[in-house]
Every structure is written in C-alpha cells, then in structure tokens.
Image (tube, rainbow, N blue to C red):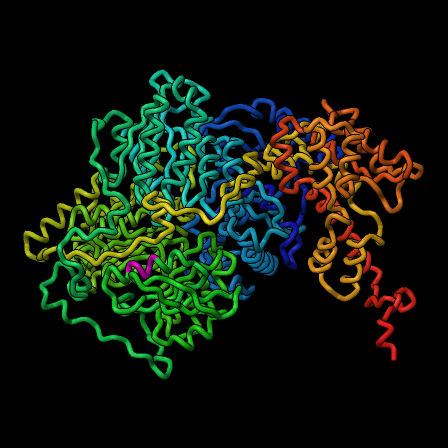
Amino acid sequence: MSAKAISEQTGKEFLYKYICTSAAVQNRFKYASVTADTDWVRLAQEHPWLLTERLVIKPDQLIKRRGKLGLVGVNLDLKGVQDWLRPRLMKETTVAKAKGILKNFLIEPFVAHKQEEEFYICIYAAREGDYVLFHHEGGVDVGDVDAKAQKLLLGVDKKLTEDAVKGRLLTHVPADKRAVLASFVVGLFNLYEELFFTYLEINPLVVTKDGVFVLDMAAKIDATADYICKAKWGDIEFPPPFGREAYPEEAYIADLDAKSGASLKLTLLNPRGRIWTMVAGGGASVVYSDTICDLGGVDELANYGEYSGAPSEQQTYDYAKTILSLMTREKHRDGKVLIIGGSIANFTNVAATFKGIVRAIKDYQVPLQEHEVSIFVRRGGPNYQEGLRVMGEVGKTTGIPIHVFGTETHMTAIVGMALGHRPIPNQPPAAAHTANFLLNTSASVSTPGTSRTASFSEPKAASSASPAKKSKPSVPPAVPTVKATTLFSKETKAIVWGMQTRAVQGMLDFDYVCSREEPSVAAMVYPFTGDHKQKFYWGHKEILLPVYKNMGDAMKKHPEVDVLISFASLRSAFESTMETMQYHQIRTIAIIAEGIPEAHTRRLIKRADEKGVTIIGPATVGGIKPGCFKIGNTGGMLDNILASKLYRPGSVAYVSRSGGMSNELNNIVSRNTDGVFEGVAIGGDRYPGSTFMDHVLRYQDTPEVKMIVVLGEIGGTEEYKIGQGIKSGRITKPVVCWCIGTCATMFSSEVQFGHAGACANQASETAVAKNQALMEAGAFVPRSFDELGDIIKSVYDDLVASRVIIPAMEVPPPTVPMDYSWARELGLIRKPASFMTSICDERGQELLYAGMPITEVFKEEMGLGGVLGLLWFQRRLPRYACHFIEMCLMVTADHGPAVSGAHNTIICARAGKDLISSLTSGLLTIGDRFGGALDAAAKEFSKAFDSGLLPMEFVNKMKKEGRLIMGIGHRVKSINNPDMRVQILKDFVKQHFPATQLLDYALDVEKITTSKVPQSRFMGVASLLSLPCRDEADEFVEIGALNGIFVLGRSMGFIGHYLDQKRLKQGLYRHPWDDISYVLPEHMSM
C-alpha cells in the first residue's frame, strides 16, 4: 500500500523538525511517550518540563475523536497523569466496532486558551491535486468540516501563497491572526509536499499571543516515497489500526516483501479462526475474503494476505510455513480449512510457487493432521497443471485432505466447498495440458488473418474494412487535442523500456498466433548497455530486434511507434515516462511498475492530459486487444490465450484494476460469451493513469463492443461516474459491474488490501455503497462475485436473442512452437547436459555447498577448511582435518620474493600488468621443481607403504632406478636448520589425527635420507593421506588435490607481492648485466 497512517508523535516530530514558517511554533519537541514499561523517574529526568507544567495525556494509537470518547486527560500534574492512566493503561476499550488494548500514550504540555483561538486545518490528496480545508472554529465539536470549512484546491505542481490563503481560507479569521496563520498554513503545505504526506489534519490548531500550538494531529504518508525521504523520515514504525495487534509474523512477512521483487502481504484478523487463506494476487485476495464473508465466515476468517509478482520457491515456502505455523497453534473444535486460491496468473510459474507450498505442507504434516486441516486449491496460469498435480500428490502421500481444482472451476467455488455450502466434486474435469498449444486440433494449418482480426461476432464483410497500414512519417505528426478512442490495432507498434525478453517474446508469440504481418515490438530501450541487437522468435524463424541505449535514438529511428510499454523500476519509471511524453508520436504508455509515489503519478497524469496521452497503470499488467495487440505479460502464456480465445476479437470489453483478475475475466468472459474485444487493467494504485470511465466511454464509442464489464474495487469514487453516465444516457450499452471489497464493512478494524487504492476513507468509497449505487443507476450487478459469470451470460444471451450479437463460426489459430526452456520446465523434452557438477548449486533461494546451505556453513562456523572440505572432498571433514587444512594454507602462503613464483609475480606487477595476469604468471612456475612435488611425494610414499617395502628398501629402490624421492631435500632448510613449518604440521598430525602410519613411514625415510646429507624438504604431505577411506584418498591424490592446497595457499602470497609492488610504486624491472653470464660460442666471437 502507499498511504500509511503514522502516530501523532511521529507526525509532530516531522512538523517540528522540518516546517519552515515565520509563525512562532511553540512547544517544539515537548512530548513524552508512555507505555506499561515506562520508568517514571527516568521519564521525568529526560523531560524536566513534566514536573513544572500542567499536562495533557491521550492514547496515540490511531484512535479518532479521542475527546468525544473521554480518552483525553486535561490540565493535570504528573501525579494526576499517573492517576488518570491507572484505570486505562493496558485495559481493553471499544472504539466503534473495534476492541483493543490501550498501550501507548502521549503526554504534552497543557495549553490554556480560549475557544475562539481554536482553528481546524486539513490537507489531503486527490487525483486532481491537494485540497486545503480551513475552518475558523476547531476542537472536538467542529462537526462536519466538509460542509463548513473553506476549501482550496491546489492543482498538481501548483504552489500555495500567503495571499491565496488569506483570500480563500482565512476570511472568517480575526485580522490580527491572519498573517501568523497564513505563514503557518503555507509552511505546513510545503512540509506536506516535501515529506510526501497524503493526509495531514490538525484539530485544534491554537493561535494565541504567544504563537502557534499544534494540539491534536493525524497524518498519513506515502510509504512508497521511502527511497526519496529516507534521510528525513528515518526508520518509521507504522502502527496497526486500533483493535488489531501487531504480530511478529506480520513484520517477518513485511521484511520478506521489502527484500523481494514479489509482493508478500499478511494481516492477522483472528488468530483463533478456523478459515485461513493463502491467495495469489492482490485483487483475488480481496475476492476470496469477500466470498468467505458473504458465506457467513467473517467471524472465523483468520487472516488476509496475498503472494504475487512471481515469488521464488523459497519465498513461497517462507510465506507458507508462516501461515501453517500460525494456524496450527490452537485447535478448533470444527477443524480448520486452508484456502489456497488465486486467479489465472499472467506470468507467475504456478508449479514453482506450489513447490514451495508443498515443502511447507510436508514440514507441517503432523500438526496439520492433528488440527484436522482440510486444504482447498484452485489456480491457473503458466504450468498450473504441474502445480496442481504436485499438490494433489502431496495430499495422497501425507493423508491430508487436499482438494485440487483448475481453471475449469469458478475461482471462488472452493470457498463454498470449504465452508460446506457446495458439494465437493469427486472427479473434477481434467484441464488441458499447457503443452496443448503445440497442437492444432483443426485440419486447417492456418487461416486468413482477416478472419481472426475482425470482430468475431460481426459479418465477414465488415472484417475487410481494416485500417490502412501506417506509413512512416517523415515529420512528427501534429499533437492531438484529445485522447484516442482506439488505442490498439493490428498495425500498432511499440517500444519496450527495459530488458524484458520474456515479455517481448510473449508479445511476439501473440502477434504470430493472431496472424499479424509484423511483430508489434519495434525496438527496446535499455540505458545500461550500448546499442545492440536482441534475438527473438517469430513463429519458427529467428529475428533480431534493436536495443537502444537512449529513448531519443529509438524514437527517431522508429517514427511508426505510438505505444511505450515501460518496465522501468519504481525509482526510474517517473523520469523515463516524463521523457517519453516529450515525443509527440507516443499516444499510449503502459507503466508496469508498482510502488511509484502518488505525487509522481499525479504529475504523470497531468502531463499526459496536456499531451493527449493515455496512460495504463502504474501497478498493472497492462491490457489486451484480441487479434491485435497485447501489453507485456497480459493474458499469460499461449495455452491461456488459446483457452480464452484471445487470438480473435469477441463482443465484450472489460476494465478492471487488478492484472490477475483481468486474466480471470478473460476466462469468465470466454466461457460465457463469444469472447473479449478488449480488456484493460488500469492498475491498483489510488490514482491510475486512466480511469474506469475513460475506458468505458471508449468502449461505448466503439461499434464492435456490444457489452461492457467493469470489475471495480473498494476505495475511490470513480465507479459512481459510470452510474452517472448510465443515468444521463451517455452510456447506452449494457454494463455488468461488480466492486470487490464488500468484506471491508464487516471487519471491526481497518484492513488495507493488496492494492494501494483498495481502502475506503469514507462510506461512499465502500464496495457495498458503490454496488448499490450502480444497481440503482441501471447497471447489471450480481449479488456476489460467484454470480458474475451468470450475469454476464444472461446479458450476452439477451443480446444474441435480440440479434445485437451474431456469433460467428470458430476459426482455429496457427500453431506456435514452444520455447525450449519452457518445454524443459514442463518435462516434455530431455537433453544431455553440457556440464555436470556435484559440489555447488546456486539455483535456489540459498547457495548450497555440497548440499549444505551457506547459512548453515556460517552457523556451524565451519571455517575455510570446512568449506574446502565440502567443495573439494564433498564431505564434512572432522574439526581436526579442517584445522589442518587451514594450517597448510597458512604455512604455504608465502616463502619470500626469491622463489620463482613470487619472482615472476613481482616482475609482471612491475611491468604494469593487472592482478590476474601477475598471479597467473607466478602460478605457472609451480611444478615438480617448485611446490608441485606434493602429489608425486604422496603417490610414491603411498605406493611403497602399500607394497610392504621397508623404508630402507624404498630408498634403495629409488636410488637404483635413478629417481629422486619427492618431498626430500631443500635448497636452504636442513636437519641443522629445520623448517618450522614442517615441524608445526608434524606435531599437529601426531597430536590430533587418529592414525599416522604413512606419516611414520615417511619420517623413517627422512631419517635414512638425511643420515649423511642433512637436508630435509619433507612437508608433511603424507599426513593428508590419513583420510578414513584409502581408495578415496588415493583418488584425491591422483587428481591433484594436494597440489591444489599449495596453489591455493601460495596464491595468497603472490597476491601480497603484487599489492606490495603496486603500493611501493616499483618501476619496470630490468635484470642487471653483472648477474648474467654471457657465454657465446667461441667460433662466433670473431
């Protein structure tokens, strides 16, 4: 959501810190917070004014009209405050329908004043700008301020002046207070804009001879502006509405949501309830809650929440296990039900998300059985058949009753089944497999394009009148004065902002199945790479689409483009969209991003209105015009496009807020009518770029559209304009309308639903009120969402009966090959892998080392030796072995600059080479003569030991064969000058390893070889062979694991030498002549 209420203390802190006004604002930062844990002595020390001033105390928990409710203690001393608190603190109280515990209180100085010194001011945001309300009488008895107050609308980007305040708002204020109030109101409005408030009310605002006093304050801020205002906001805690506790599980899910590109929401309504939901989609989550409440389950509804936006398997698992943990804490006498529902997804891989839910169900198998939980599942979308299959299988294997349904079942039918209002089908109809779009069920391989792009219900003759193909203009077209009625045609060309290759490929596949002559995507814009070409498929053929670094180049080279589809992030969407509207050729912009600050969206709307541009979004999946054009991921994959017959136009046009619900409407409309002519999801934000009425009027003026479907929502008043249009006769076509969110009026506390705009700020914004008004205006309104399909079918059948609609014969579309990656995802094909790996897996939510999650590696403090054991030996080595490996790395890290590897590294560094080149130069010197004798030594000692040779026999054998014994001999170290590195390793192995036969054998060999020549180069290599499995140890020696330890350790030293040379700024190395012996052939000396 965007607009979130903040505590009074937080609001006043912002005001005192940042307001800029010449008015003398008094009592700045004079407030103290009190809870049950407050230490009163310390509180008085921190706020000495508590002991010297008269005080006011009140709860700070988003409670309205506290004075009327007797929840304000006035003109008290500190002891009086404590006495007043005693019967109230941590006590339950009822405010309207909400029951809650009074926990947080605010103490402020009491301000003695007269009634005529009290004023009322409120600033709040609307689509058209910001309203400033001012009334010369404030306080608890202010009454209906909307009717009484002076009101001033500041349009978007307009500034408030003191003259405007005096002339429009302060007409009833005494003259001696106007200047002070005007300055304060202007400063307050500037603060409101600067800190992205959406609502700010002060009542009363007291003005005395001493200055301005802010007594009571209520405020909301746009939480999506956090990335802009973080420095000034700091870390804000948003309190829950009164009557609803803040649970740690809600905070956990909010944290997951903040770290994810997906949307994860959870609100606990009644933790003891028996009805739990896990719903995919912001709109669908509201519909399921509505249906549960409609069927009498409001008192047993435990939670509201949603997961959407393609969460990963791990994210879905974390979300699901939180729900299951909550619902299995207390038993219910009637058992419990879990409704795993959702609309038909546009781009979320249903099977992947369901795998996360299945993991959670398996983890909670026993608690779910003990609490007698029944699970009802309904879902559609990409790969949903596999998801449903997996869900059904886990029900069979765990014994938990899991009832699974797909798109053949109405979305909310499972609610009636779960609550006992509908029978549960024994064998639900089997849905077609996702792969069916590969097959053409008709004998016809393809059909003429016109037969699929003309309106499906019009006579064939009408289909020939297709618009002429656009020519490329040599000069920019004139700027239109009004927005277009027709946004998309089969010649529409678009530019896609963002490297969204999957969405673009989906658009091209849709184009192909609609028999478009050319792709609808002309180019892409991606500022983070240079200009290049990106490969896509057009049917069976590969094509290249240009990708530009900047918008200007794309527009200049593609003047035929009139649509921009923006996948820009919430941080960059505003700037990129404003830039786009500089180009007159763009007539339609779809903004996919969710979370754009409302102030920015309103500026986009203003600019779009000035330019005659239609904006779809923000926070949308887009829209679709069957047979012509689709935006991004709208409509889902081809299997859904074919199932919902979106490859050719029907007679029904719809508009909704929700993207997921728009795909559900595609399904409902296709099952009950001849199909969709056009559908748009305007987005879930409070201020969508275009409104319901904008699109309804377009549909009214489009002859091919015969009936209109509107899926409205709680929040805002746009739906009333549709009713007014019907009453006035502007809208004459049948309108089927339903507003979701009817459950909100049944909840005791305020619930913010998934969409930012889904919140009623007054009675007229409730879904119930809007549905009633639409019905009275003449729209076709069902009794619930369950009946929406029936109403649509009834209206459609009447239109067919009256021959307004003449259904035409179905014509099959051409087939489109399935992408390899998706076919593999579905398990339809197999291919030998190019690589195999058994040590690491980065594909999931968490990196795995030999099957061990990286968090466990750190949790168990395995260290570098433990990680090396996992990645090299695929096992958890014992602690002593891990420590030994780390010791080996430490003792081999460096041996000075004189050795060949370090020498090479230094020379390369001084030659100006980079780190990698210098390191590689040093590593290339490692071999049998330098550092690389470890593997050979291990092989020789092991072979001699296994063959039963005595140490003396082994030495004699090697001497007879004329071979050196690897690991023996050193240029510097000897018995008389022992290598302490060797001694350290030997002592550790002797003390900690369970068996040291090979080490003992090697030490005996050392004694023989050094008895006359006191040189020892033995480095304890045989100690590494003391692994539990001898065959495994031999294999690791054979493939170079011991040398690997030396290479890894010595790399640290080489890098150190490189950095040292760079730090010392050493120049190019040239070897001195006097250190070179020049020996030329004598016969050439002449």
Which residues are drawn in magenta? Answer: 506-510
Q: Residue at x 22, y 27 (%)?
A: 424
State left or right for residue 978 relative to residue 411: right
In the image, 389 versus 799, the foreground residue is 389
Residue in front for this viewpoint, 749 or 419: 419
Residue 570, image x and y in percent?
A: 49, 56
Q: Which residue is at the front of the view, 734 or 566?
A: 566
Rendered location of residue 919, percent (x, y) = 72, 55
The extreme bottom residue here reads: 474
Which SS does the magenta portion mostly show? helix
Residue 192 coordinates in the image, percent (x, y): 55, 55
**Observer-nearest of 39 and 85:** 39
Examine the structure image and report whether residue 444 is included in the region drawn in magenta. no
Residue shown at 16% from the left, 58% from the top = 706
Q: Is residue 688 above or below residue 290?
A: below
Magenta segment: does it hold 509?
Answer: yes
Would residue 6 be found to the left or right of residue 972 on screen?
A: left
